[in-house]
Image: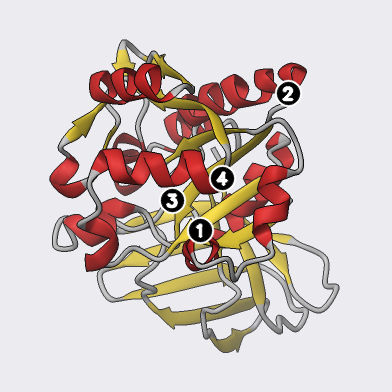
């Protein structure tokens, strides 16, 4: 999968980016825009819509953000990311998408009018098809809704589709709902909506290791990136670094710190992934 920075798309306007050849090599692209935090089963319906365009010769891909937009717009109420950018990019590649354009959200980007943004995608990404959820909005202050988008598409010569939401328990599946379920410790629902266990990337977490008899204790200050459950004890499976075998552990979530209790006498160098067990 090809990963492209939004700044490289902007450079195409000045003819300074070699990615123009990538987007003009085929018949065009099939695109979806969003944070895709998870990604969850609703996002996968969008991916399916893009992949179905391959039979028409279109190249499927997404435009996403370095972090989910909810973290920028409502930082005080935000519960944390469901997935890191690295995890999302891996999910896109595993889904069969050919490219991902990554946008570093900024004040300048937020002020782009919806129709201008769509025209950039059409011109520089050679967009021929756009798939979005029925509640999708873009452009300055979210002024451009899916109805406007479909109207612009008809006027501009590309196709657009509004993909219906996916339901779970008679409620719409969404990233905000999954974040709340993580906070509540409802990992059965989380795993269903993600189609996979919830995994926290621990590669950048600095753990302090202590050993007491046959138990290893790992302590760390609470990271600010991925969502974690409220105070409590949870069963997890750890993927360890340096080729060590994984193991089960108890994860203790506290207001200002994290703690792992590992019932083993072997040396633990570092934790790569923490997966919540339902």
Answer left or right for 121 relative to 60: left
With respect to residue 147, does 82 lie above or below?
A: below
Percent across and percent down for residue 107 are 22, 67
Q: Which percent across, then down, holds residue 74?
A: 16, 56
Q: Measure how far apart labels 4 and 3 are at the Cα level.
A: 28 Å
Q: CA distance from mark 1 to mark 3?
A: 17 Å
Q: Which mark is residue 102?
A: 1
Q: Which mark's residue is nearer the viewer, 2 or 3? A: 2
The local crowd at label 3, few if under 14, some if 14 to 19, many if 20 or more residues have their Cα within 10 Å, is many
The residue at the point 25 percent across, 18 percent down is 147
- Give the Cα distance between marks 1 and 4: 13 Å
Mark closer to the chain start, 1 or 3? 3
Marks 1 and 4: which is nearer the front? Answer: 4
Residue 67: quarter of image: bottom left
In depth, the one of 272 and 127 nearer the eye is 127
Residue 274 seen anywhere in this rendered image of the structure: no
The quadrant of the picture occupied by the C terminus is top right
Q: Looking at the picture, how far across and down is residue 26, in whole percent?
A: 75, 36
Residue 125 circle label: 4
Counting residues from the start of the chain, the first of labels 4 and 2 encountered is: 2
Mark 4–mark 2 Cα distance, whole angstroms, equals: 16 Å
Q: Which residue is mark 3?
A: 82
């Amino acid at each position: 999968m090809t990963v492209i920075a939004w700044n490289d798309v902007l450079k195409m306007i000045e003819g300074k980016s070699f990615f123009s050849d990538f987007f003009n090599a085929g018949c065009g692209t099939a695109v979806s825009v969003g944070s895709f935090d998870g990604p969850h089963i609703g996002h996968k319906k969008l991916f399916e819509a893009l992949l179905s365009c391959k039979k028409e010769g279109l190249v499927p891909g997404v435009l996403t953000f370095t972090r989910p937009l909810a973290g920028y717009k409502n930082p005080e109420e935000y519960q944390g990311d469901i997935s890191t950018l690295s995890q999302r990019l891996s999910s896109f590649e595993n889904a069969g998408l050919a490219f991902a354009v990554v946008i570093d959200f900024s004040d300048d980007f937020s002020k782009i009018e919806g129709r201008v943004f769509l025209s950039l995608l059409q011109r520089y990404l050679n967009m021929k098809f756009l798939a979005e959820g029925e509640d999708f909005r873009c452009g300055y202050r979210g002024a451009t809704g899916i109805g406007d988008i479909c109207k612009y598409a008809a006027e501009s010569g590309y196709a657009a589709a509004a993909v219906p939401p996916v339901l779970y328990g008679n409620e719409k599946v969404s990233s905000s709902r999954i974040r709340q379920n993580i906070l509540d410790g409802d990992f059965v629902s989380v795993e269903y909506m993600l189609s996979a266990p919830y995994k926290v990337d621990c590669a950048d977490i600095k753990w302090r290791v202590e050993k007491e008899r046959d138990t290893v204790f790992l302590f760390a200050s609470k990271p600010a990136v991925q969502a974690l459950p409220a105070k409590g004890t949870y069963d997890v499976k750890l993927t360890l670094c340096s080729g060590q075998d994984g193991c089960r552990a108890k994860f203790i979530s506290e207001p200002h710190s994290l703690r792992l209790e590992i019932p083993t006498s072997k040396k633990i160098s570092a934790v790569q992934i923490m997966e919540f067990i339902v």
